[in-house]
Image (cartoon, rainbow, N blue to C red):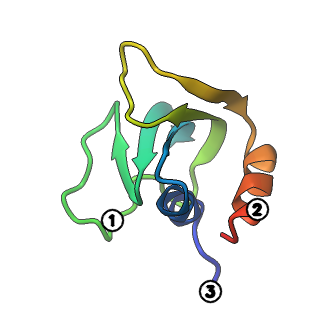
Amino acid sequence: MAISIGRRLEEYTIKRPQEVLIVTAEIAGEEDQITIFKGFSSSLVRSTPFDPDIPVLPTDAKIVTIDRVASPYNPDAPRYLQQGLTWETMQQLLSEVGV
C-alpha cells in the first residue's frame, strides 16, 4: 500500500525538524490550512481530531500550495524558506530525504 500524502509530509518534517510545512489544501470543496511539524499535523481552519490515526490531510485532498517555514513557527512573523511550492516541486524535496 502506498504511503499517503499527509504521512509523507509528516515524515519529511521528522527528517527536517528545523522546518514547518504550511499546506494549503482543498478538502471536500473547502480550503484548509494545515501545519505539519515534527511528524504531527494540525488544521488552522477546522478542528483537529484527537486520534492521530485519523489523517488531518485526507487522501482525496487537493494540494494547492506548500510553504516551508523555519522553526520555531511564529504566525505573526513567519520566516519563510520557500513559498507557494506545488505538489510536484515538494515531491522532489521528499525524494531528497528519502520519503
Mark 1 or mark 3, which has the lower sequence index? 3
Mark 1 near mark 2, Cβ–Cβ under 8 Å? no
Secondary structure at badge 2 equals helix
Q: Position of residue 27 (x, y in %)?
A: 50, 42
Q: Quadrant of residue 52?
A: bottom left
Amino acid type shown at disc 2: Glu
Q: Quadrant of residue 72?
A: top left
Secondary structure at badge 1 equals loop
Q: CA distance from mark 1 to mark 2?
A: 27 Å
Residue at position x 45%, y 33% in the image = 33
Q: Position of residue 8 (x, y in %)?
A: 58, 64
Query: Which part of the image, by quadrant, shows the N terminus?
Result: bottom right
Reading the image, the residue beneath label 3 is 1
Reading the image, the residue beneath label 2 is 96
Between 1 and 17, the residue placed more toward the observer is 17
Q: Residue furthest top?
A: 76
Query: Which part of the image, by quadrant, shows the C terminus?
Result: bottom right
Amino acid type shown at disc 1: Ile
**In the rendered view, would you say 22 is above or below 11?**
above
